[in-house]
Amino acid sequence: MKPPTEIDAAEMTANPVAGIDQTKGDFKYDVKYDFDAGTGLNETTVRYISTVKKEAPWLLEFRLKALETFRKKPLPTHWATKDLENINFDKIRYYLSQGQKPKRTWDEVPDDIKHTFERLGIPEQERKFLAGVEAQFDSEAAYSNIKDIVAKQGVIFMNSTEALREHPEIFRKWFGKVIPTSDNKFSALNSAVFSGGSFIYVPPGVKVAQPLQAYFRINAENFGQFERTLIIADEGAEVVYMEGCTAPKFSTSTLHSAVVELVALKGAKIQYITVQNWANNVFNLVTKRGLAHEDAEIKWIDCNIGSRLTMKYPGVVLKGERARGEVLSIALANDGQHQDTGAKMIHAANNTTSNIIAKSISVGQGRSTYRGVVHIPKHLKGCKNNTECDALLINTNSRTDTYPAISVKGDRNATQHEASVSKVNEDMIFYMQSRGLTEAQAMSLAVNGFINDLARQFPMEYSVELKRLIDLEMEGSVG
Amino acid sequence: MSQLEIKDLHISIGDKPIVKGLNLTVRQGEVHAIMGPNGTGKSTLAKAVAGHPDYAITRGDVLLGGKSILGMEPDERARGGLFLAFQYPSEIPGVSIANFLRAAVQARMAEGEELDASGYYKRLYAKMDMLKIDRKFTSRAVNEGFSGGEKKRCEILQMAMLEPKIALMDETDSGLDIDALRIVADGVNTLRAGVQAPGIVLITHYQRLLNYIVPDFVHVMHDGRIVKSGDKSLALELEEKGYDWVKQEVAATA
Amino acid sequence: MSVSNTDALTGSFTREAFEAHLARVRHLPAWWLERKRAAYERFAALPMPGRTDEGWRFSKLGGLTLEGFALPPAIRLDQMAHRELGVTGAGHIVLANNRLVAREIVAPDLLRQGVIFDSLQNALLQHGDLVRAHLLAQPSKLGSDKFAALHEAFLEDGAFIHVPKNVEVALPLGIFHYASGAGAAVFPHTLVVADDNARVTIADLFLTAKPTQTPAPGPEAQFACGGHDLYAGHGAQVTYLAMQDWSRETLSFQFDAKVVRRDARVLSLNLHAGARQARHESFSQLQAPGAHSEMLALTVAHGTQEFDQRTLQIHQAPNTSSNLLYKNALLDQAKTIFSGLIVVDPDAQKTDAYQSNRNLMLSEEAEAHSLPGLEIQANDVRCTHGATSARIDREQEFYLESRGIKPAQAQELLVFGFFEEVLGKVEHAQLHDALTDIIREKFKAG
């Protein structure tokens, strides 16, 4: 396979392989839902969700308290976009499923749902390179499986609904500890109505060789998906988790609001990869944070291509000495899209280091925003942060913003932030055109080159998909 | 005559040993070339002798004029007569060459002694002329925005002004075109011909520089040690045969 | 002044205090009086900054109290120690406690050429239209609407400079704004109008007056709320150098607004050394092609001082450029905030904008916040920003020491080098040296 930026005009003009273009998610089946919490959000909705999931009383209490917090908190429009005001919380369906128990084999999955994931290529990817897959359809996982060889090492991988029942002791220990309910309005919303998402526990010293993957599918209109993911890598453990997502294009807006908590215990490594490809009507408001203990490493690789509005700032709390945190972020905003993404690095121990590299591309009237927080409080020493943000603007009315906030105390720590905004280099385009490429091909190559060093960090299968997604987004952006 | 004596020197960066028992004696007026492939510890040796805080000397000693310098701070070593011409000289924004060199010269004078400004500038300009450095450079910030050749000439200028007893020149030829190399070599040769000629250690990867600054001794460094020494003909032999030949010889005798 | 029953929103600056101020400054043009009254109403109605105000992120809101200040009595020049700048200038104006106390024009041909260098009060009476067109004509966009309104309401006197078309003022003009006495509230203002192709260099100093009598008084909490308007017409070249050195107990606001027209070049340098808490808002508008604004600042922060700097550079036309460099040297428990925003309007293609904040951390307890922002709505631009916070570079330190320079001196050279990167942009040699001396002295004095 060729590296993504190699100049190959033949490959450029080839039709996108089935199953990896951005429109691939734009289909739906009329599924009959056995469980439906109805439209709108109140205490009854929350009780309904808790009841069908047969949850313990403490959890219902947790949810009800979160609902209160959600109601009390204002929308963060004093710093965030006013577009948030267009979310109508009363018109959303908060829970839809065909049942709470996922199937272990694809054959058992109901046909419509199975066909959905087949069209998205999930079973094929599972066979090829994954250690386990969880496929969520609206509110619940329809399929969940982990390869025997991985399960035998003691790795737990299941959806959070099941995990709460089967492993309450580990789940409860970390649940809501990295991201408290009151962190923000949407973490509170998620805490009230969450359903699905993954739970992973990797025992001490176990290094999971292949990635685990979750795929999140929204099928229903006016739906809100609120998965909750918790990943715990015990001492010296290593795991790579990948998530993908799609939804059909509806005329009304859809809400996706997840909470993802990562815990890397001493010396553990967690890599969390997201390729977000929601349809253009989805409000994607996600809270993601990891807690890195001594010598641990947490790396977020976050790629946002879809959605109407994404607000997502993956963070790492560097709690133990020498912990390392990293966020690599790619955002592509096309007409009607606002990618408001970034990173948070909270240093809380000596000699911790963090690195943020964010690249965004704005096409047409698309808007990309970088928002970052780097915090190095008093009396720490030997902490370092490096941040690089680069924005590429394709068309005359494309827009980008950069809003970092870097706080450092003391002379024993160091931070460095650099950002740039530019358009595609005209000489570069001319050079490629002089070799026979069309302007659109040249532009596509240039854009791929711009993100190449980050795209490289993705597993091969994903970086190829990423490149094609970008090619598709770039179509029609020139001329 | 002052001399530099390096005795059974061991140097580590962090936990990693780089120089592993190196011996070398350099007398004033002599030129020693230390050659060897990349990663054998040549630059580590130079920086550690100059007192860089990242390099830990774990065994052995370094004497200057018979006195150990290991307990001395970098500035004390420099005032004691040691000079390091850096491979990658630091850029120092906002500090002009004139002010920087004046501070360095002043630091060598006794407490309360005043620098004779006109004498200082006269001497500075003479050295600059010798090194073909434009006089406008005196008001420029040290090394900031300098080309590779300008940086190296600026290093030689400092060496000429500070008149060290022993100079360690770390890859002074790297990044220089042939004209710049000639200018630098002429500068070094002029200092070498002077009354107070310093002892010079030329650290270099290539033989090219040695065509212009002819060494009295040539040492080959490999894996943290000097494994072969000879006169200038050794350099020519290396040029012809490469370093593998020395490595094989070392392996055979080990 | 009564401090017993003050409104939480107005502090010492009550309606009675405002009326008393108006009663003292008679003969104001009607338009100005009307604006002042409107400004007071805005001031009294606007809330104090709160926790969720983005424009006040990281600021010490508790330090913004308006209590305990009063409009100070007049003081004569001979009652205070006037600080000469040691620069051969074209003239100077001295204001103390909101009043003109001295004016001298050394270069007589200035007046012949039509240059106006006078107090703002005189200008209001004699050049009303010119003042009206430019005085506080730009909106407050950086968070201090309330305090900017306070400034407008209580503004009594300041300096006015008008350089007519094609006239060059070769020597710098000096302006000194003094505050004298504990509790003094001053509202300094400098208005600079440089017509097309005019050239002028201005040194603007904001100082707490040291009385001539000894012993010097104890702590002198003062309140300073001032700023400037600077208009550079087509092809004009304006160099504006400001030094803020209020007493270390002062609460200071400084609001600067610059308008840069076609092919005009403005270089502004703000030095900050004084005050307990100093907020500086600087707003630069690049309104026509070829406009260039160089925005420089240098802060020496000691003790528990807080320097809060907010900047906005708006590129409103194609082919404009701006370059911002704000450097802070932080000692002790000092705190700095830099929040800057480059805005490129949708049609401002070919913009070249740069923004840089460098914090030199010189103590274990100093605290630096950097918020360098960009909002870009045109694609054919070159916009970059950078922010660093770090101690003195260890490799630079080693390099100097390896030349025999002692560690303490090496450190001083590097700190002064850090300053010089900003000061070096002042081309006027005498002014460069004078400002360098002041900054070095401030750094050493601690």
Image: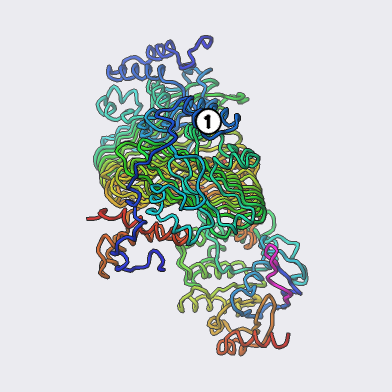
Q: Left of A153 or right of it: where is A67?
A: left
The image position of residue C130, as x and y in percent, is 26, 29
Residue A367: image quadrant is top left
Q: Left of B110 or right of it: where is C344?
A: left
**Amino acid type, label 1:** Thr
The image position of residue A217, as x and y in percent, is 41, 45
Quarter in which the C terminus of chain C is drawn? top right
Q: Left of B74 or right of it: where is A30?
A: left
The residue where tag 1 is placed is A51
Residue C167 in view of the camera: no
Q: Left of A159 or right of it: where is A246?
A: left
Q: Residue at x 27, y 19 (%)?
A: C31
Q: Is residue A72 above or below residue B132?
A: above
Q: Considering depth in this image, is A345 or C146 the residue closer to the camera?
A: A345
Q: Residue at x 51, y 25 (%)?
A: A68
Specify the segment rendered in magenta. B12-22
The secondary structure making up most of the magenta span is strand
The chain ID associated with circle 1 is A
